[in-house]
Amino acid sequence: MDLRNFPEDLDAPQRVKKRRALIEKELNMDLSAVEVSSRQIGSADQQNCEQMFGAIPLPVGLAGPLKIQFSSGEISETYVPLATTEGALVASINRGCKALTQAGGVRVSSEYVGITRSIAFEAQHVKEIGQKIRQLESVWKKIGEATSQHLKILSYEIDSQDDVLFLTIAADTDEAMGMNMVTIAAQAVGEFLSEKLGIPMLTVAGNVDSDKKPSTRTKLHGRGFRVRAESVLPEEIIEGVLKSDSQALLRTARAKLEIGSKLAGALGKNLHIANGIAALYLATGQDAAHIVEGSLADTVVSKHPDGISISVELPALLVGVRGGGTNLPAQKQCLDLLLKTKTRLRPSTQLAETIGATALAGEISLLAAQSTHTLARAHRTHARTKV
């Protein structure tokens, strides 16, 4: 099937429809359920999906309001769009939002670490080559930054093993998540150093950056945004909203987060942070594969004189408000909904901090469900499991 060479006068909806008709004819299948309207396509056919023949609808639910105190000191009651096919998830996060909001909200802080790329070179004398790369820092940084007016190299690290040297650059990519941007910059840097130092460039992505893969390095060094969200839940809210009590929450947290995670050798000691991140990433057009790094998060629950203190630390949230899927019509509207209340923060920072706060809402609600043994019942009620 030739799904690419169509007459130039066909617009995006016509190309998508023609591809679907060709596939249906060739494979003798009905694919009418993936039909998509011209309003929904946006730039997807040209920028997001090659050989596009339709779209998969994802249910989107609303949680909130969630009261958040951002790192700027500003307070907002935010509504959260969540794209998911998992029954009970939106209801659970919504309950967590209610509990946290009634408790006074979530305090959030963040640090922008930058988006990273690791260039791998073949080098016989890695120590000497490393010194030369440091001496040429101002030159290769200028070459990398010249590839985009929105990119600035923040820092770099040099690692070596055997005859392979890795140069990992971390860049500020403005309001974009910036993976493609930093890859283009890294390619230019790698080509320059390869020619200047006479060392073969092996790959622009050498895995030290652990892109879309879990690693201890990402957990320790961070990637994209490092976000922390915390709150104190008084006993009356734990009992009234979460239908549990502080002692039950503490016992369950100890068994699950501390002991269970240690036995498993878990990189992320949390309840289900990937769930909330996935739903928010899908709703707002983020690169869903970066949920992997997002899940490297730790949840800490401790006793407080009023009830419990709970916090989440997410070392690697890779998000943006420009580029990629954020430009698609439905995702753009969900992103606008999430960021409806403007703050002094960079929009991508506000997005990352909101995700951190939402993750905390999801954690406290699931912890309560597990401490009261109502998790299975919740899934049955919300039609995830039929018995």
Image (cartoon, rainbow, N blue to C red):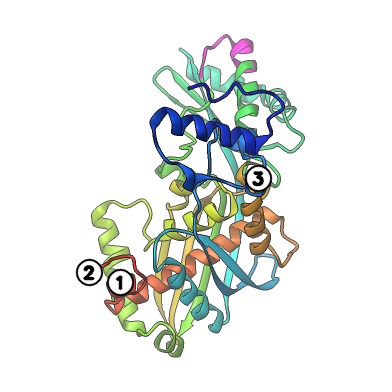
As helix, strand or loop, the secondary structure at mark 2 comes to loop
**Residue 248, x across and y down, in percent:** 30, 81
Residue 265 in the figure: left or right of residue 124: left
As helix, strand or loop, the secondary structure at mark 1 comes to helix
Q: Are marks 1 and 3 in contact (CB under 8 Å)?
A: no
Query: Given the image, on which type of amino acid does mark 2 rest?
Result: Val
Along the viewing direction, whichever of 159 and 369 lies nearer the viewer = 369
Q: Marks 1 and 3, how far apart in space?
A: 37 Å
Is 201 within the magenta? yes
Residue bearing the label numbered 2: 387
Residue 380's mark? 1
Along the viewing direction, whichever of 288 and 127 lies nearer the viewer = 288
**Residue 100, x across and y down, in percent:** 52, 78
Judge depth for marks 1 and 2 and give the one in front: 2
Please report the bounds of the magenta region as a residue range: 192-202
Residue 363 in the figure: left or right of residue 5: left
As helix, strand or loop, the secondary structure at mark 3 comes to helix
Query: Given the image, on which type of amino acid does mark 3 rest?
Result: Ser
Residue name at image x 35 percent, y 84 percent: 244
Residue 38's mark? 3
Q: Marks 1 and 2, how far apart in space?
A: 8 Å
Q: Is residue 169 visible?
A: no
Q: Earlier along the polypeptide chain: callout 1 or callout 2?
A: 1
Residue name at image x 45 percent, y 25 percent: 160
